[in-house]
Image (spheres, grey):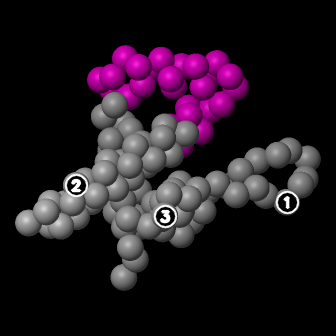
Amino acid sequence: MRNVCSPRPASPRYVAQARYLLPPEKTTRHRLNRGGDRAANSALHIIAIGRLRTDPRTKAYIAKRVAEGHSKLEAIRCLKRYIAREVFSLISQRKREINQGRNAA
């Protein structure tokens, strides 16, 4: 069983949001790591689409990425990586709070 609260660099890889470079060819492109937890990736996708529909900051972020030349799908991938880091930090913080509560009791 995988540890959900793994070290920070491994967390995007766990939810299949980590990128790796393809061998140099005509263009420089990234491909997503196809390993990882599909359920976690699905949850991130639902969060990202929900934010995209309701949150003005998220809409502005996606518009900025598209203006930079990214496709809408690539912009959503960037958003999902950001959300993965945000969720991981919340889980880690909550885990520390629970452990401190156990030590105090």
Label 3: which residue? 7
Q: Is mark 1 on a helix, strand or loop?
A: loop
The image position of residue 89, as x and y in percent, is 38, 49
Q: Which residue is drawn at 38% across and 28% down?
A: 52
Amino acid residing under circle 2 = Glu
Determine which of the numbered discs, if any, sits on residue 68 in the image: none
Q: How crowded is mark 2: few (under 14 residues within 10 Å), some or many (20 or more)?
A: few
**Residue at (79, 58) in percent of width and height:** 22
Q: Give the Cα separation between the discs numbered 2 and 1.
A: 43 Å
- Frontmost of labels 2 and 1 is 2
Which residue is outermost to the front?
104
Range of magenta residues? 52-77
Q: Can residue 43 be seen in this view?
A: no
User: What amino acid is at disc 3?
Assistant: Pro
**Which numbered disc flags the more N-terminal residue, 1 or 3?**
3
**Type of the residue with mark 1:** Pro
Report the mark closest to the observer, 3 or 2: 2
The residue labelled by disc 1 is: 23
Task: Report helix, strand or loop for mark 2.
Answer: helix
- Which residue lies at the image location 44% right of the left edge and 67% below the top edge? 6
**In the picture shown, does residue 69 fall above or below 33?**
above
Tell me which label, 3 or 2, sits earlier in the chain.
Answer: 3
